[in-house]
Image (cartoon, grey):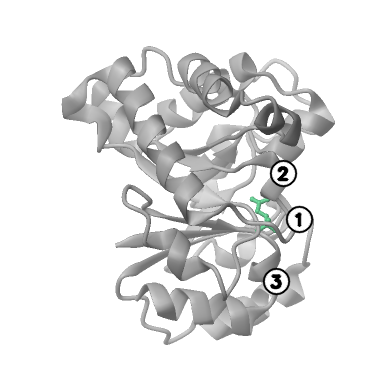
Amino acid sequence: MSKIVANYKVNFVDADFKKLLKRMDGFSFKNAEFIVCPPYTSLHIFKNKSVLLGAQNLSSTDKIPTGEISAEMLKDMNVKYVILGHSERRKAFFETDEQIRNKVLKALEFGLKPIVCVGESLQNKKKGETLSVLEKQLNTILRDIYTNELENIIIAYEPVWAIGSGNAIKKSDLQEIVKNIKFILEKMYGKLFVNKISILYGGSVNVDNYQSIISVKGIDGLLVGGVALDFEKLFKIIEGLN
Ligand code: PGA
């Protein structure tokens, strides 16, 4: 079973999501778990449908109320997944690994599955810091999570330089990085639990490169942004995963 998470960011309004829902109607997802992550304002379109629904953020605290959305509110919308720590939020809102960790804990407390985004910047990559950046992010965000919660955690490896750039990672590089992510997780949780955590890749996935990405050992699925806006392309990928 491969996961495909569609991150709609600030794209689309209700009318567009109704079209997506129509496109999904009667489609047999077989081997693909399709998780739709619309903006908060359109979650209601999917609320009472048999759709795997995700949000793009949540508030880690109930103490800063204005404008925030809590885990409880997401639960009430039938949300099952939540993208946390996306690099666009880290950059725009200065989200730290520690804050992302608090959001992960809040998600787990309410039975939501966190999709935790990690990845290096272009500068990190050029300096050869990719693995140390990943280790630091994972060590901070996922430290001391109860092992019985690990199967509810999804890591999305998203190199920042690949997001929206049209430049996806090379298969050989992804192979190496996934191996190392597993190694980091093994150091944190031991061999027995490493494979409980799913690992997705995100960053310029498209119809031409998804097959090579999904064929990488240890990759359990894809996180897509831009390509999800084009239903023909999106469903071509979903069909390919089936
Ligand atoms: P992209 O976005 O597929 O457009 O690169 C992925 C993401 O931002 O998660």
Corner quadrant of residue 167? bottom right
Point out residue 56 in the picture as x, y percentages from the top left corner.
Answer: 64, 45
Corner quadrant of residue 233? bottom right
Label number found at residue 229:
3
| Amino acid on which the number 1 mark rests in the picture | Ser
Q: CA distance from mark 3 to mark 2?
A: 20 Å
Residue visible at 54% across and 19% down? 132
Check if mark 2's residue and mark 1's residue have beta carbons within 8 Å: yes
| Amino acid on which the number 3 mark rests in the picture | Leu
Side of 118 relative to 143 (left or right): right
| Residue that badge 2 annotates | 161
Point out residue 84 in the picture as x, y percentages from the top left corner.
Answer: 59, 35
Label number found at residue 144:
none
Choose between 235 and 207: the one closer to the eye: 207
Q: Is residue 223 above or below residue 183?
A: below
Report if residue 80 is visible in the image: no
Q: CA distance from mark 3 to mark 1?
A: 15 Å
| Residue that badge 1 annotates | 165
Sort mark 1 into few (<14), some (14-19) or many (20+) by Cα contacts within 10 Å: few
Q: CA distance from mark 2 to mark 1?
A: 7 Å
Point out residue 196 in the picture as x, y percentages from the top left corner.
Answer: 26, 37
SS type, badge 3: helix
| Amino acid on which the number 2 mark rests in the picture | Trp
**Which label lies toward us, 3 or 1?**
1
Choose between 33 and 117: the one closer to the eye: 117
SS type, badge 2: helix
Report if residue 90 is visible in the image: yes
Q: Is residue 226 above or below residue 62?
A: below
